[in-house]
Image (spheres, rainbow, N blue to C red):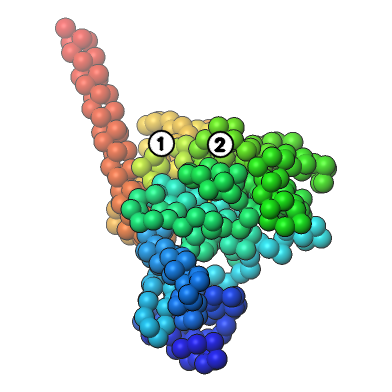
């Protein structure tokens, strides 16, 4: 199979629908996986590329690196790799199909995105790259062309062909990546860590905010000199309305010395989540980044991975209620359970107070653990302004097995705590009765 044989009808078992794009080394197609009945994207490497006498070894290495990650990186903001085939007739990688465009078009000064959306995008990228780093993977080629935007704000990082796998014992290629987005240590071909991806993401953030690269040169050599030696102009000099807190984040990510950059992705993500100010975002509705940060801090979700928290965000409804709102009425039939994000609620049974719950606690979970059309055994009423996340039992039943497993674990801890509390109260009650008798 070669470039002149196109158009084609099938690649392996996959039915080609259309060509999405073509580069110097490969073409990408939208295709149908008839066995899974889902759309996929297929990156088909041109055969002559892999046997090229000058660069064939390099391209084969890039192909093998990306193919080796099939099934290993599972994150809502990373393009999933489903399958990889290396044969004489065809070498290709089968990936998740993303119906969207890259961020390249939003790096032009006349197409810049709103600043809150840029912060949201970079936050999601930071979370995804944090996840990859925890799996021992450094991307090494973060740039707008490798970040896909689907819909309003769904982000997917793609193209891990240049990735550095820290757990691999094979020799890693040097000199990979796009010079304009490389970190100082990358252009110097020094050992890399996750902080190199931080620098590259900082370059992307700078470009999305300003419509220009922080380091510019007539050729790669002058650009590399600037990356190593020159401080970029402040973003506010180009776009004055950029908040100073946002500017501080991008400039810290672009520090030349790794000691001066963020040390952890969590620090980077936290600053992004809070950059626009809590009060402003509370008034206008939660950004996904803030929702994620809130969930991460709640004790109920401490055993959940980042991937599972993103899944929770997809199945949960966030609601605000004023004081004296009845969320659950004794005797009613319901299928939802709630996790209190802020404020307090009281639980009553036959108008007798049973308990007061505070932020981070769960109620109504028997609707999920019990039978369908569960009849509520107590009432729950807010005693202050509150925020809750509501999850319907039937919705959670469709979540992944691991996500449901962690919910079961959290519910079990909750039940143990409540039984312990009930036993303590019973013991105290019996002790008080003994005292009154004697």
The answer to which of 48 and 144 lies nearer the viewer is 48
Q: Which residue is mark 2?
A: 258
Q: Identify the residue at horizontal 55%, vertical 91% (top origin).
A: 4
- Other-residue count near label 2 (Cα within 10 Å), few / some / many at <14 / 14–19 / ≥20: many
Q: Identify the residue at horizontal 77%, vertical 40% (top origin).
A: 234
The answer to which of 19 and 416 lies nearer the viewer is 19
Mark 1 residue element: helix
Instruction: Please name which of the two marks, 1 or 2, marks the residue nearer to the observer.
Output: 2
Q: Which residue is mark 1?
A: 299
| Picture layout, residue 277 above or below residue 88 | above
In the rendered structure, the answer to whether residue 363 lies left or right of residue 220 reads left
Q: Identify the residue at horizontal 24%, vertical 14% (top origin).
A: 432
Q: Are marks 1 and 2 in contact (CB under 8 Å)?
A: no
The x and y percentages for residue 342 are 53, 36
The x and y percentages for residue 214 are 72, 48
Does residue 276 appear in this view? no
| Residue sticking out furthest to the front | 53
- Other-residue count near label 1 (Cα within 10 Å), few / some / many at <14 / 14–19 / ≥20: few
| Picture layout, residue 315 above or below residue 438 | below
């Amino acid at each position: 199979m070669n470039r002149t044989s196109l158009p084609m009808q099938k690649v392996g078992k996959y039915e080609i629908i259309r060509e999405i794009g073509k580069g110097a080394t490969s073409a990408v197609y939208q295709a149908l996986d008839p066995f899974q009945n889902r759309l996929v994207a297929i990156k088909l490497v041109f055969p002559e590329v892999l046997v090229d006498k000058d660069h064939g070894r390099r391209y084969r290495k890039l192909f093998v690196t990306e193919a080796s990650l099939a099934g290993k990186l599972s994150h809502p903001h990373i393009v999933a790799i489903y399958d990889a085939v290396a044969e004489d007739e065809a070498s290709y990688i089968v990936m998740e199909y993303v119906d969207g465009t890259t961020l390249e078009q939003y790096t032009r000064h006349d197409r810049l995105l709103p600043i809150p959306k840029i912060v949201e995008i970079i936050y999601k990228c930071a979370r995804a790259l944090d996840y990859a780093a925890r799996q021992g993977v450094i991307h090494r080629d973060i740039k707008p062309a490798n970040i896909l935007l689907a819909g309003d704000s769904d982000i997917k990082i793609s193209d891990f062909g240049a990735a550095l796998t820290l757990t691999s014992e094979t020799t890693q290629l040097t000199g990979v990546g796009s010079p304009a987005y490389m970190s100082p240590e990358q252009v110097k071909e020094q050992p890399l860590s996750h902080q190199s991806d931080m620098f590259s993401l900082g370059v992307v953030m700078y470009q999305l905010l300003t419509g220009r690269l922080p380091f510019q040169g007539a050729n790669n050599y002058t650009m590399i000199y600037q990356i190593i030696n020159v401080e970029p102009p402040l973003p506010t000099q180009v776009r004055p309305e950029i908040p100073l807190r946002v500017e501080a984040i991008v400039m810290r990510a672009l520090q030349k010395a790794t000691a001066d950059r963020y040390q952890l992705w969590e620090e980077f993500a936290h600053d992004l989540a809070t950059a626009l100010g809590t009060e402003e975002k509370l008034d206008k509705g939660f950004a996904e980044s803030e929702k994620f940060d809130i969930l991460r801090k709640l004790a109920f979700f401490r055993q959940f991975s980042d991937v599972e928290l993103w899944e929770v965000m997809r199945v949960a409804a966030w609601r605000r209620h004023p004081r004296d709102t009845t969320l659950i009425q004794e005797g009613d039939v319901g299928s939802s359970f709630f996790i209190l994000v802020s404020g307090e609620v009281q639980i009553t049974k036959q108008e007798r107070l049973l308990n007061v719950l505070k932020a981070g606690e769960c109620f109504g979970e028997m609707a999920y653990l019990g039978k369908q059309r569960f009849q509520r055994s107590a009432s729950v009423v807010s005693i202050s302004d509150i925020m809750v996340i509501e999850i319907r039992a039937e919705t959670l039943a469709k979540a992944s097995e691991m996500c449901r497993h962690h919910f079961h674990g959290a519910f079990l801890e909750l039940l143990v705590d409540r039984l312990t509390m009930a036993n303590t109260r019973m013991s105290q009650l019996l002790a008080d009765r003994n005292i009154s008798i004697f």
